[in-house]
Amino acid sequence: MKKYVFPLILLAVFEAVAVILWLTKGNIFYLFNFSYIGISISLGVFLFIKKYKYARRIVQLAVGLYMLVYLGFICGENMQIEGFWYYLFTGVFEAATIHYAVAKIFGPLIFGRGWCGYACWTAMVLDFLPYKTPGKKGKKLGFIRYITFALSVIFVAALFLSKVGNIERIMFWSFIIGNVLYYGVGIASAFIFKDNRAFCKYFCPVTVFLKPASYFSLVRIKCDESKCVKCGKCAKVCPMEVDVTDNSRKRKNGTECILCMECVKNCPKDAL
């Protein structure tokens, strides 16, 4: 039963967040929201332990479609980074600000960039593309993510400074247009670089939040050096080009790890 402790801990963490937000905000939506996400992620980890091939993809679809379709299109919440700036500028700790605080600012201190591997609705689509492992490695284009991050701040700040009317409607349409742009750039870059995760590595502004906190992540891939035979299979299957055989926090591309577990599944010696 010890191997099932981790999914139970994950479920307990999300349930704790759900109950705390429900009681402090007085809104039962938060109980449903974080309970649903916690159950989905815990189920995915359970299925992974049971060696079910599509465990991670089930979580991606369950959480990603919920965030995109229900929260985004049906509830009209801008769950992209622009929505975070919008609520932050209005001084309201709701919706996107809570989401970012839990999943992308403080959450990565516990589970690193697990968001990217299990919940991102952009990556949910990109992972269906044919380039599961990078065809062209080592592109030094990560600076672009900081440009898109700055542009997102400038865009929302400009709306407030210009005092435009019906700003909530503008934010809803920016969510739709933003998703179209994300998918367009993501799919195009995947084919250009022969890498499904090129968008995550070079363009995604959310990673500016995720990367610093994930450096200190409690949950991370570790290597049992006594079992490792240096076969290099983990390096071949890693979509983010992380050197998981190095247990140091300074390992190559360490803050890029999305906990997809491809390295764990393909290690012939169970060293990871």
Image (cartoon, grey):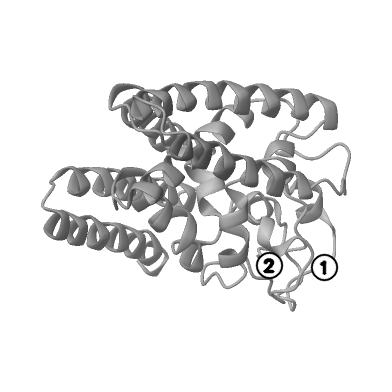
- Amino acid on which the number 1 mark rests in the picture: Val
Where is the C terminus found, in terms of image quarters? bottom right
**Label pair 1/2, CB-CB below 8 angstroms:** yes
Vertical relation: 255 (above or below) 216:
above
Q: Can residue 112 be seen in this view?
A: yes
Front-most of 76 and 59?
76
Residue furthest out toward the front: 162
Q: Residue at x 34, y 24 (%)?
A: 166
Sequence-wise first label, 1 or 2: 1
Vertical order, 227 against 188 (above or below): below
Query: In which quadrant of the rendered view does residue 101 lie?
Result: bottom left
Q: Viewer-proximal residue, 215 or 100?
A: 100
> Which residue appears at 30% of the width and 57% of the height?
14
Quarter of the picture holding the N terminus? bottom left
Amino acid tagged 2: Ala
According to the picture, the residue beneath numbered tag 1 turns out to be 229
User: For mark 2, what is the residue?
Assistant: 271
In depth, the one of 22 and 258 nearer the eye is 22
Q: Which residue is drawn at 21% across and 57% down?
A: 21
Which residue is painted at 37% across and 58% down in the image? 7
Mark 1 neighbour class, 10 Å CA radius: few under 14, some 14 to 19, many 20 or more: few
Rendering coords of residue 67 (x, y %) = 38, 34
Residue 151 in the image: state x and y as whole percent. 63, 40
Q: Is residue 52 visible to the viewer in this orientation of the structure? A: no
